Image (cartoon, coloured by chain):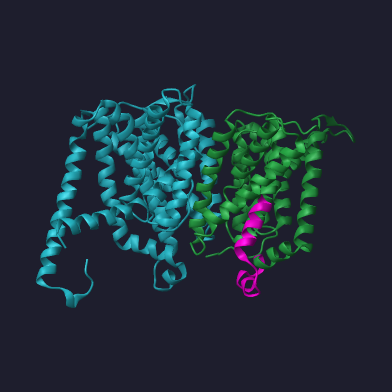
Chain colours: A green, B cyan
Amino acid sequence: MSFFLEVLIGGLLAGVMYTMVALGFVIIYKASGVFNFAQGAMVLFAALTFVSLVERGLSFPWALAGTLGVMLLLAVAIERVVLRPLVNAPPLALFLATLGLASVLEGLAQSVWGTQVHGLDLYVSDVPLGGLGVQVSRFDLFAAATAGLLVLGLAILFRTTRAGVSLRAVADDPLAAIAVGIDLPRLWTIAWGVAGVVALVAGLLWGARVGVQFSLSLVVLKALPVLIIGGFSSIGGAIAGGLIVGATEKLAEVYVGSYVGGGTESWSPYVLALGFLLVRPAGLFGERIVERV
Amino acid sequence: MSTDVSAWSQSEDVKMTRKTALSIAATVLVAALALALPRLVTDYVLSAILVPFLALALAAIGQNLVTGYAGQLSVGSAAFMSVGAFAAYDLHLHVPSIPLLVSFAFGGFIAAVTGALFGLPSLRIRGFYLVASTLAAQFFIEWLFTKVGWFSGNSASGVIMAPPLVVAGLDFSSPGGHYWLSLLVVVPLAILGRNLVQGRVGRAWMAVRDMEIAAAIVGVPTRRAKLLAFAIGSFYCGVAGALWAFAYLGTVEPHGFDLDRSFQILFIAILGGLGSVVGPFLGAAFVVLFPIALDNVAGGALGSVVDPGLLENVEKIIFGSLVILFLVKQPAGLARLAAIAWTRLCRVALRE
């Protein structure tokens, strides 16, 4: 039983990481209706920039500030170069453009900062904490707490600031938002900037765990089932979806994977997501925006 | 072509005939070039550039049928390629007397069934959500071929040698032979694909892509059209996968058909032009030739020491930028640019 609990908690904590990536998606999707495949590349880009700045002798806060600046500049550039010219393009074209963007960001990050694996130390040791007969990693708890703070921060941002309220207005009804004078392109920049910050936090936590390397970019592939399960437009959904995906993929790998040779983690979230699509296409918390035939 | 009937005159008629003659001449020229190539280029060019070019172009035609014509997003083309490669290999393994081209067709058929299966969710959902289904195919199929030994004939390494390429008693195992075999498979399928998209099936696909509800109202069987797109598109991918494994690599292994390959094929389809059968050839030529050109330019300009990792990343930047650039400036891709160039050429040639 305690083994089951350990696997479950380990899975839930891995799910926190998926949630962090999915959050960036949700913010962009709500503001601009774009399904941003480049979110994973943004995680890689942010983490690699941060680590490289630290390795070049910058102190932690300065490196953080520098990376934040880079991510915000990136958001401005993306709005100008990708989003604005494709304003009336079909959603498919926008999605394909983010595929191109992912390729550009991955190439850019790795040709500027190199392809080797970087270690990242966040000064939180990865030691197991005991209690009630279950061992939990301290780092994972720290990551979960950070994610919680991030969500809280986002919630406050969306509720209280002018930009946040405008973002919610756009998500609710883009035409009405334009009609009352909300500057849509500026808001897109803000949304992509916020998503960039979320990517930075996710990249730091994930990078400290597995090393800052190309595979960071591939977490985007885990975020997709998370979004389908949770719903594309709900932050609560991203959290629930992330936890569900994390828990089921670990449990499935431990209890089912051993019979079929292992490695089920690559596809089990997708099978789960397909099941959800057939039963509840809008996800757990999503609005019914999925076009059903 | 002029659509204004009243403007139709004798001189127009003559112009049209000339234009037709010109396009026939161009077709003959391309065909002659394709036939003469094995004598003109080295074995390296044949087996390392032209064969993968043809296989990728065929796969991109399959991608284009699904995404460009029927408007269904798929990012699992490489998985369907691997299904084709493994099915062709397994048929050959268990029934060695089967002719090679029949096992290619069998590979395509099994890929078609698989594609239709993973296309089933398209009956209920649209848009991005479909990415989940094709990504599920991508990961699950790759895992299946890696983990289940039966598919690779229980070989210990998981990497298996493709059988010798013999069709109707003729030996195709030289580099030139690989090229001829690829040409023999790809050209008829490309022509078939072109006829398909111009006919009833293709029109149904485009109707579904452009406005599904309207298509359903005017009596297009939308569900059948979508499943058919997945099936036929995957058939093309499956045959392309068999070619890739048998004629290009000479081995059958799951890892060559990973997600990166799927994206490569999607990029070929976008750069070449979504909704075009010529486009995939142009896109594939670009994708195959560009890295070689970049390598040569970098090698020439910066001396011989260029980090291949850096070059690969520069390549990623350029490909990604081109995808964005084409989506913004020329969504119809290289095929449209070629068509514009062709029209200008005709105008100059006919002195209009």
Q: Position of residue B30 (x, y in %)?
A: 20, 44
Total numbered labels placed on residues in the image: 0
**Is A98 rendered above or below residue B1?**
above
Question: Residue A238, can we see it?
Answer: yes
Horizontally, residue B20 falls left or right of residue A264, namely left
Q: Kindly identify the residue that appears in the image at 68 percent across and 32 percent down.
A: A210
Q: Where is residue B60 in the image (x, y as percent from the top left)?
A: 38, 46
Quadrant hosting residue A130: top right
Q: Kindly identify the residue that appears in the image at 73 percent across and 62 percent down.
A: A164
**Is B180 rendered above or below residue A222?**
above
Q: Where is residue B311 in the image (x, y as percent from the top left)?
A: 47, 32
Q: What quarter of the picture does the N terminus of chain B occupy?
A: bottom left
Q: What quarter of the picture does the C terminus of chain B occupy?
A: bottom left
Q: Where is residue A237 in the image (x, y as percent from the top left)?
A: 71, 55
Question: Residue B173, can we see it?
Answer: no
Residue toward you, A256 or A207: A207
Residue B243 is a magenta residue: no
Horizontally, residue B117 falls left or right of residue A223, namely left
Toward the right, the furthest residue is: A132
Residue toward you, A63 or B101: A63
Quadrant hosting residue A230: bottom right
Residue toward you, B231 or B73: B73
Residue toward you, B72 or B234: B72
Horizontally, residue B270 falls left or right of residue A281, namely left
Q: Kindly identify the residue that appears in the image at 25 percent across and 27 percent down.
A: B42
Residue A194 is a magenta residue: yes
**Is B323 rendered above or below residue B288?**
below
Query: Magenta stretch: dominant SS?
Result: helix
Magenta extent? A171-195
